[in-house]
Amino acid sequence: MATRARKGTDVKAHTRKVLRALVREYPDSHCALLHANPYELLVATILSAQCTDARVNLTTPALFRRYPSPRALAAADPAELEALIRSTGFFRSKARNLLAMAQAVVETHQGEIPRRLDDLVTLAGVGRKTANVVMGTAFGEPSGVVVDTHVKRLSKRLGLTTQLDPVKIEADLMAVVPRKEWIDLSHRLIEHGRKVCLARAPRCQACALAEVCPKVGVTTGKAQVKAGKRSSRARASTKVKA
C-alpha cells in the first residue's frame, strides 16, 4: 500500500510536496485528446489504446464528421469505420468496440453517454481507466485516478506506490491524494512523463520535481546515459507506418 511506499516517511506529506511541485510546473495541464463533448472524448479514448494521442487527434476529425453522434456511429458500416480508424492500430477490434458501444448507448441510454461510472464500464471497449477519463474530463466528476503507462511509471518513481497493477496503483493514489486533485493529477503526471520523466532515460537534471523525487528504480550516471543512447537508436531504427 501507499503507506509503505517510503519507509520512515510520512507518505501523505511527501505526496503534498509532489502535488505542489506538479501544480507549479503544470498549472494548466489538460487532456491531450481533442474533443467537443463526452461522446467524442469516449470515442477518442477508446481509440487511444496502444496508440499515441497525437495519432488519435489526426484521425478523429474525419471520424466525427462522418459519425457526429452515437446514433450515427451505431449505424456505421463496419468496413467504412475500419478504414477511417486504421491508422490507430488494432482497427478491427476497435471498430467492433465502437459499434457495440454506440449501439448500447442508443438502446440503453437514449443516445446519451452515461454519467455514471458503473454504466460506462458496461460499454464495449470501456474499462475503468477509460471510464475515469470520461467521468473526470467530460463530466468533471473525480471518480478515480486515470492510471495509464505514464501514471503507472511516475507514481512508482515518485514514491507514491510500490504496486505494479493499475487497479492497486489507483487505490494507493486515491488513498493519499485529495479527491479534488484526482483529475488534474493524472493530466499533470502524463504531461510530465511525456516531457521529462521518460521511460528509459528520464531527464532528472532538468526535472522540476528532482528535490522531492526519490527516483525509485531510476538508473543514474553512465548507466542512464547508455540507456538513453540505446533508446534513441531503437527509436531511430523503428519505422511506424502512418
Image (tube, grey):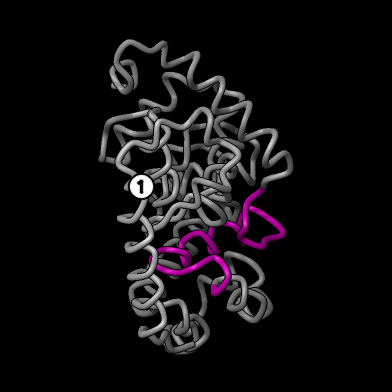
Q: Which residues are magenta?
A: 30-55
> Relative to residue 95, is residue 14 depicted above or below?
above
Rendered-image quadrant of the N terminus: top left
Report if residue 90 lies within the magenta region. no
The quadrant in which residue 241 appears is bottom left
Image location of residue 114, percent across then percent down: 54, 45
Q: Is residue 136 left or right of residue 26?
A: left
Residue at point 36%, 58% (across, down): 200
The quadrant in which residue 4 appears is top left
Residue at point 39%, 55% (across, down): 199
Residue 128 visible in the current orientation? no
The residue closer to the viewer here, 196 or 121, is 196
* Residue type at numbered disc 1: Thr
Say which residue label 1 marks. Answer: 220
Kindly state the secondary structure of the residue where label 1 is placed.
Answer: loop
Residue at point 40%, 46% (across, down): 121
The residue closer to the viewer here, 190 or 217, is 217
Report if residue 44 lies within the magenta region. yes
Image location of residue 47, percent across then percent down: 47, 67
